[in-house]
Structure formats: C-alpha cells, structure tokens
Image: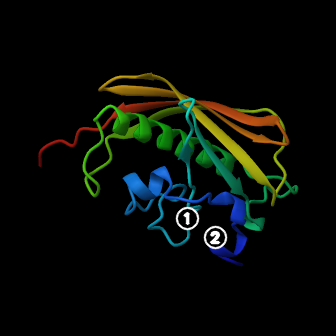
Amino acid sequence: MGGPDEHRAAADAPAGSSIQERLYPDITCFGCGHANPKGLHLRSYPCPDGSVVATFTTWPEHDNGFGFVNGGIIATLLDCHSGAAVFHAANDVGLQRAIGDPLLYVTAGLDVRYRRPTPLGVPVELVARVVEQDDDRSAVEVTLSWEDQVRASARADWRRWRPRPA
C-alpha cells in the first residue's frame, strides 16, 4: 500500500504554495493537513473570480468496493476544500489568526449530494465559493467534478471557533 506521494499526480500541485501550505502548514487534518504523513494533502488555490480550486487524484485505497471513490473520501475532499475557501476569505478580510494559532472556523455542517459515481485514479476538480461570511459563520458551495460533470456537491456551514478559558 503506497502513501500519498506515490499516488499524487503532478497536476495536483500547481506552482506556488497552496492555501493550506500558506495559512495552516502545521495542521494534521486527514484531508488538508500537510503535517499528516498519511493524509490526503489537498492543495487548494484562489482564482481571480473569487472561487477556490483544487485538483486531486484519488488512490486505490479510496475504493468503495465497486471501483469508484468511497463516499467518505468524497465528503472529506468537499469539507476540506470548502475550509480552504473559508480560511482564504477570512484571511482576505483580516480575520485569519497568526500561523500556528488555532483555526478560526470549524465545520458545523456538511450537506453532501452524491450525483454520479466518481471513478478511481483520475484527477477530479474541486471548486468552492464562499456564499456568506461574517465574523461568526461562513457558508460555502462546493463541487467535485470529473470530465465536466458534477459528481458530488455540498453546502458547507462553518462556525467561528472560540476556545473557552480553562
């Protein structure tokens, strides 16, 4: 069983640092944490139109048993990619904390719709757009597509996380 680097296609990592690598390089999240050696290491990038995009090639280990991508992996990709959009937008308006501080938002809800099976081992495209954001919450619409067909979509709701004093 190979690790992430054995399966990741060159197309998954455009030139330059991703949102994850710039804003939260030390997080160990399975989907987007680059400090997790067994994680997906998702890399998301901002676009001039305000959306955030990523390309990801699934691994053989992500098989649902029928030759398609497991729904949990799809949900993880949608969740983590929507997070990149939230943190990028928060950073743009000065809400992001310093690198190394706890993250500003956490997932409060993820409403996933599976539309078509997603084949294994092919580059899929993720597109996310923040549709609402204020100091306390963010809402994101995110899609996962292959060959210009949406395979899954989600609305992700994020809430501001405020640690309680000990």
> Is residue 164 shown above or below 158?
below
Where does residue 30 sit, x and y in percent of width and height? Answer: 52, 59
Q: Label 1's element?
A: loop
- In the displayed structure, 110 sits above or below 31; it is above
Q: Nearer the viewer, residue 9 or 159?
A: 9
Q: Quadrant of residue 154?
A: top right
* Residue 112 visible in this rendered orientation of the protein: no
Left or right, residue 93 beside residue 129: left
Crowding near the residue tagged with mark 1, few <14, some 14–19, many ≥20 C-alpha atoms within 10 Å: some
**Mark 2 belongs to which amino acid?**
Pro
Q: Circle 1 sits on which residue?
A: 39
Q: Which corner quadrant holds the N terminus?
A: bottom right
CB of mark 1 within 8 Å of CB of mark 2?
yes
Residue 4: image tag: 2
Q: Residues within 10 Å of mark 2 (few under 14, many from 20)?
A: some
- Along the line of sight, which residue is nearer the eye, 22 or 112? 22
User: Residue 14: where, in percent of width, then height?
Assistant: 62, 57
Kindly state the secondary structure of the residue where label 2 is placed.
helix
Tell me what residue is drawn at x 37 percent, y 26 percent: 137
| Amino acid type shown at disc 1 | Gly
Residue that appears at 46% across and 54% down: 20
Mark 1 or mark 2, which has the lower sequence index? 2
